[in-house]
Structures are given as structure tokens and as C-alpha cells.
Amino acid sequence: MQKTTAPTTVSSKSTFDLILTSMAIALVFVATLLLNIRLPIAANGGLVHLGTAMLFIIAMLFGPKKAALAGAFGMGLFDLVSGWTAWAPISFIARGLQGYIVGQIAWSASRMGNSKTFNIVGAIASVPVMLAVYYIGEAIIFSNLIIPAASIPGNLVQNAVGLIVAIPVVIALKKVPFFKRDFQKQNQ
């Protein structure tokens, strides 16, 4: 009779990471899709949606790698299925970088997203990078350096709303036992 063994720790961790990352991607996608308001600022004024808040939350709770994947794939997929197809590659890069930056700063020096100050600094530091990538991408799409400026106010509003929503949610979730335990050390 052959003895069966429990899955190895590495295999269990890999499976858990895959599930968590997939869920993070889905959460960013759904949050972007569920509530989005098109801003009446020029033709490409952009959207305000909860996807940015979800991206910030994931970055602060799970770190830079999961946030980069969640932002890139979640918002890129949203663009593909919602009529913003030309923006999908731009979103993939902009939101992947944004998630990575927020997570990297929030998780720097073993903080693991536990510092409200560094969480806010991370989110704010990510905004110029996101703006620059969208500006360059739109400049390429429109073959114009002026037209992309119309989307900057909408992107600023979107990030401000995302931060205002994300910080209290992260503070509340950090009180949940799941996020208090050694999960964060395992997640690195």
C-alpha cells in the first residue's frame, strides 16, 4: 500500500499565491467595471471608478508583486471588454507600475502595509508615474501632445477617490485576524 503525503509547503504556498493573485485581478476588474462614471471633460476625460481604490487596497495588503499583476491585468482586461480597447496596453503598463510602486513603498523596511503614512505616501508617489504613462500612451494614440492633457484632471480625481476609499478599508482589514497573523511574512 502506497502512503500518500500532504502537499509540500512550497506547493501549498504556490497554489495559495496563485489563488490570491487571481482573486486580486478579479477584484480590480470587477471594481472597475461595477461603478464607473465617465467624466465630462473633453472626449477623453476618463473614468472615475473603484478599481483604483481596489488596486491601492491590494497593494497595501499584499505587496508590490500581487498589486502589479492585479492592476495590470485587472484594468487591462476592463479596457478590453468595455470599449476602451486602445487604452488596454497603456492601462496594463500604467496600472501595473502604479500597483508595484504603492506596494513597494507600503511594504518597504518590513512595514508590510502597516503604516498609514507610508501607505498614503506610496499611493501619492504612484500618481505621477501613472499620469506620465497615460499621457505618453494617449499622445501616441492621438498623435498630439495637447489632447492627452484633458485626461489629467480625471485621473487625479480617480486617484484621490481611490485613496480616500482605500485607507479606511485597509485600516479596517488590518484588524481582521487573517491579516494580523504571519500571513504577511508568508506572502513576501
Image (spheres, helix red, strand yellow):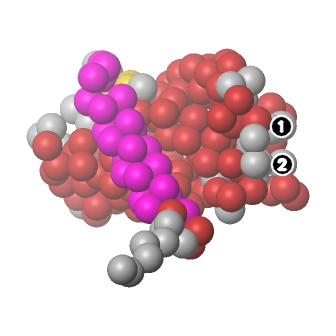
Q: In the rendered image of this protein, does residue 27 appear above or below residue 160?
A: below
Residue 131 numbered tag: none
163 drawn magenta: no
Q: Is residue 145 left or right of residue 55?
A: left
Q: Secondary structure at mark 2?
A: loop
- The span from disc 2 to disc 1 (Cα, nearest Å) is 6 Å
Q: Which residue is mark 1?
A: 115
Residue 111 numbered tag: 2
SS majority, magenta: helix
The kind of residue on which mark 2 rests is: Arg
The x, y position of residue 116, in whole percent, is 80, 32
Residue at (59% x, 68% y) in the render: 9
State the quadrant of the C terminus.
bottom right
The kind of residue on which mark 1 rests is: Ser
Q: In the rendered image of this protein, does residue 18 appear above or below residue 2?
A: above
Q: Splitting the image into 4 quarters, where does residue 167 fall? A: top right
Whether residue 133 appears in this view of the structure is: no
Whether residue 50 appears in this view of the structure is: yes
State the quadrant of the N terminus.
bottom left
Residue at (50% x, 40% y) in the render: 55
Q: Where are the magenta residues, as a range?
A: 13-38
Q: Relative to the observer, which residue lies in front, 121 or 22?
A: 22
Q: In the rendered image of this protein, does residue 121 appear above or below residue 156?
A: below
Q: Secondary structure at mark 1?
A: loop
Contact? badges 2 and 1 (CB < 8 Å): yes
